[in-house]
Amino acid sequence: RSSGAPMPFPPPAHTPYPSAIPSSQDHVSRSASDTYYIDDETMLRGHTSAHQASLLQNGYDTFLCSGDVYRRDEIDASHYPVFHQMEGVRVFPHLEPAEGSDKVQGNKEVEDDLKDALEGMVDAVFGPVEKRWIDAYFPFTEPSFELEIYYNDEWLEVLGCGVMQQDILRRAGRAEQPGWAFGLGLERLAMVLFDIPDIRLFWSEDERFLSQFKDGEITQFKPFSKFPACYKDVSFWIDPETPFHPNDLCELVRGVGGDLVEEVKLIDEFTHPKTGRTSNAFRINYRSMERSLTNEEVNAMQDDVRGQLESAFNVELR
């Protein structure tokens, strides 16, 4: 259903943002708290939507593309600074309105086709399951939806999708042709299918993990060990003159502890009624997936975090 020659997937660095994707300087897709910038002009892609325009301009009406994406994000069992995303797009040239018709956003026939296609994909992956559609917001689709499934006695979000904003298609040379798009995280899908509890395991070289899986087979992960956690708290007054976002702390902690950090969680936030100053308290969970950590090495990492936090963001440690 596509046309044009196969295209190699572009490298992960690109300018923010391709001209066919409308985004202002303050657009969510360019937020410094969520995005890795190499310099003022170059960023690592935060999602595969960055390459929709070039594929559309090369004549593809229907395509899937998968690639590595990079985000400054929170630290927990389901988030990692690099992961793999799959993007799917379908454009409907035969549904382009007649010339002179009113320009509208959204198309019910396209929306119905989107939901039908994705429900079929979910059934092919998980088997027949109960599903529900949730109205959502995404930067480049309108209307937008999340698809959830009832799996293993709980509702799980599987993917986000929607009818493509017509301005994106116009900028890609598709005029008033309508289309839909979806995106899903491949690691999160695998975590559900293989019952993998922690996204860090995908980067493990431990044979106790790797030996459990074979190409073409879905097998349930069997935990091989659970080493003790070590919790350390850090609290501080935020400098009102220095921009700070919780993702900044996560990135700092990740730089110090790497995959030895299991979670960073905000446990308290307080604004002084007289001074107006804001205090944050975070709990850092250090835990290796392969060995027990010593108090000495955890204390050293925590001291490093506190020192860098103080110097980088001018906070007052408590």
Image (cartoon, grey):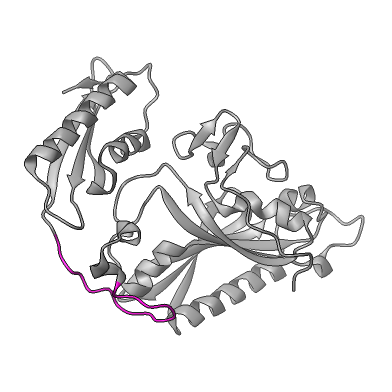
User: Does any portion of residue 316 appear in the rendered image?
Assistant: yes
Between 203 and 246, the residue placed more toward the observer is: 203
- In the picture, measured across the screen, residue 290 lies left or right of residue 46, that is left
- In the rendered structure, which segment of residues is drawn in magenta? 211-226
Q: Is residue 215 above or below residue 261?
A: below
- Residue 235 in percent (x, y) is at 19, 29
Our reading of the magenta stretch's main secondary structure is loop
* Residue in the picture at 63% in, 37% down: 15
User: Would you identify the image quadrant in which residue 279 lies?
Assistant: top left
- Residue 12 in percent (x, y) is at 56, 47
Q: Is residue 113 above or below residue 83?
A: below
Q: Is residue 180 above or below residue 34?
A: below
Q: Quadrant of the N terminus?
A: bottom right
User: Would you identify the image quadrant in which residue 9 lies?
Assistant: bottom right
- In the picture, measured across the screen, residue 309 lies left or right of residue 186, that is left
Does the segment drawn in magenta span residue 205? no
Looking at the image, the residue that sits furthest to the left is: 295
